[in-house]
Amino acid sequence: MTETLVPETARVRPALEGVPETLLWTLWNRACEARRPDAVLHDPLAIRLVDTLDHPFEEQLGPPNPLFAQTQGLRSLCFDRSIANYTARRPEATVVALGEGLETSFWRVDNGRLSWLSVELPDGAELRARLLPEHPRHRIIAKSATDLSWLDAIEDPSRGVIVTAQGLLMYLKPAEVREILAACAERLPGGVMILDSMPRWITKLAREGKLRIGNLTIPPMHWSMAPDERQKLHSAHPSIAEVRAVKLPPGRGMLGRLVQHQYRIPVYRSFAPAVTLVRFK
């Protein structure tokens, strides 16, 4: 699987800024988690990517942080399991991963029959194409998720479609999030969308330029959603049949248990990211 990656002797320096640069932080945390012998996420490609990229990860983003690393691993695992649950019922479905960055879900959940579309801004798409293995059932679309023409690239929606938006929608404007949801509901009957959202206190800090991780200033975030507000997503389109919370998988130690049950504890609900499933009629 990893033989087609750029050789480590030909290290690639990523030239990213703004929202695309955040993909390096999520990659760093997945790789840090995957290196552990008791990792919650098995992701050898993430490790190889970090080793391949000519980037000072620890200098720029800080040393491995057990909280960030495990939370990122559990979030990715949550999306993986949602994809696997859907493709277990519809094995030839198309997965559309919006704003995928250097996420490696395809190689973790591929059932040998599904199709995969990775929608990413041009800089991130170019980096993804250079670094990750080619595959006949995996295509990269170099455009913004807000350019809804990516829907035209789905060859056979009748086989089922699952759209993922991991670490993306918070950077979009509320109207853009609503337009994406409405377009998916209109054109993908029987499909689902898995998305995550940030609480208002985090998006406020990001808009004010006060959210920093190491030397990385997180770009402005525009859309937020408290877990108790999920049902408002129904208003985006009448073909939205269901909106429900997706619980993170069990984690490691006390932190892993806290993350899994965070939505049962009122004081944590407004502080933690939330994962949501939206099902279309």
Image: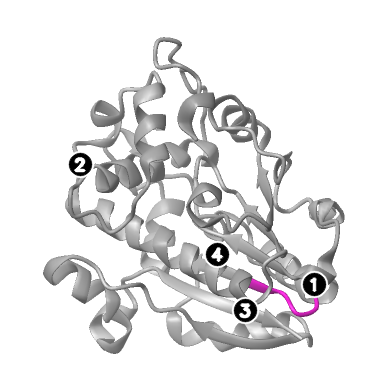
- Asked if residue 11 is positioned above or below residue 1 in the image, the reply reads above
Res 156 quadrant in image: bottom right
> Which mark sits nearer the N-terminus, 3 or 1?
1
Residue labelled with disc 2: 64
- Gap between marks 2 and 3, in whole Å? 33 Å
Marks 4/3: CA–CA distance:
17 Å
Pick the residue in front: 64 or 229: 64
Query: Residue type at mark 3?
Result: Val
Crowd around label 4: few <14 · some 14–19 · many ≥20 (10 Å): many
As drawn, the residue found furthest toward the front would be: 112
Percent x, y of residue 187? 84, 71
Q: Contact (CB < 8 A) between labels 2 and 4?
A: no
Residue under label 3: 278
Q: Are marks 1 and 4 in contact (CB under 8 Å)?
A: no
Q: Position of residue 107 (x, y in %)?
A: 52, 47
Q: Is residue 197 visible?
A: no
Q: Are marks 4 and 3 in contact (CB under 8 Å)?
A: no
The part of the image, by quadrant, that contains residue 87 is bottom right
Q: Are marks 3 and 1 in contact (CB under 8 Å)?
A: no
